[in-house]
Image (cartoon, rainbow, N blue to C red):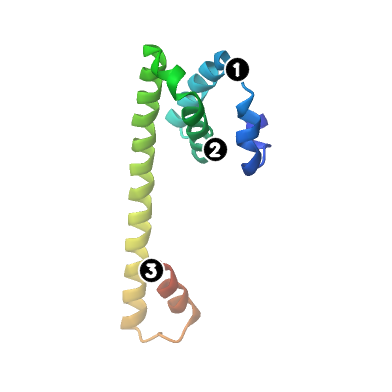
Amino acid sequence: MNELERIKYGEIGNTLRFLHFTHVEKLLYFLRYFIKNSINIELSSRILTFIISNHWGNILNSNKLVQIVSSIKYYLRKNLQREKDVIGFNLAGLKLLKREIQEKNLRGCRVYEKIEKIIKL
């Protein structure tokens, strides 16, 4: 994963394009491990997207690889739900802070303005 982290975002496609399919199979196993253990999910997802778009036909021909991709899909959804929960919890905390600031009439302070911007996003 350290070697893949060094590759620039725009060069990932060019780098993986020349990867032989036997190495793609091994990489799928590693990606499943990384995603299952929440290790660098963003990079793993980008790599997975590229691999699936370029090698989908070969992946479909192998039941084993279809099962791996299905398990990766499960773990990605699980991680996404966990991130949504964290974001929801943080947003609820910001709304609580905003309400407390409003009750204390501190509308002109910088913290209130920053919270306003974040909540509007």
Badge 2 element: helix
Q: Nearer the viewer, residue 94 or 16?
A: 16
Rounded to the nearest angstrom, the CA distance separating label 1 from label 2 is 20 Å
43 relative to 2 in the view: left or right: left
Disc nearer the start of the sequence (3/1): 1
Label of residue 96 in the image: none
Quadrant into which the N terminus falls: top right
Three-letter amino acid code at the position of disc 3: Ile
Badge 3 element: helix
- Residue that extends furthest to the front in the rendered view of this protein: 57
Q: Label 2, on which residue? A: 43
Q: Nearer the viewer, residue 95 or 49?
A: 49
Q: Nearer the viewer, mark 1 or mark 2?
A: 1
Disc nearer the start of the sequence (2/3): 2
19 relative to 121 in the view: left or right: right
Where residue 64 appears, as percent x and y from the top left, is 39, 12
Q: Label 3, on which residue? A: 119
Q: Nearer the viewer, residue 64 or 21?
A: 21
Give the residue at x 47% y 31%: 53
Three-letter amino acid code at the position of disc 1: His
Work out whether 22 lies above or below 11.
Answer: above
Q: Nearer the viewer, residue 66 or 80?
A: 66
Three-letter amino acid code at the position of disc 2: Leu
Where residue 101 appears, as percent x and y from the top left, is 37, 79
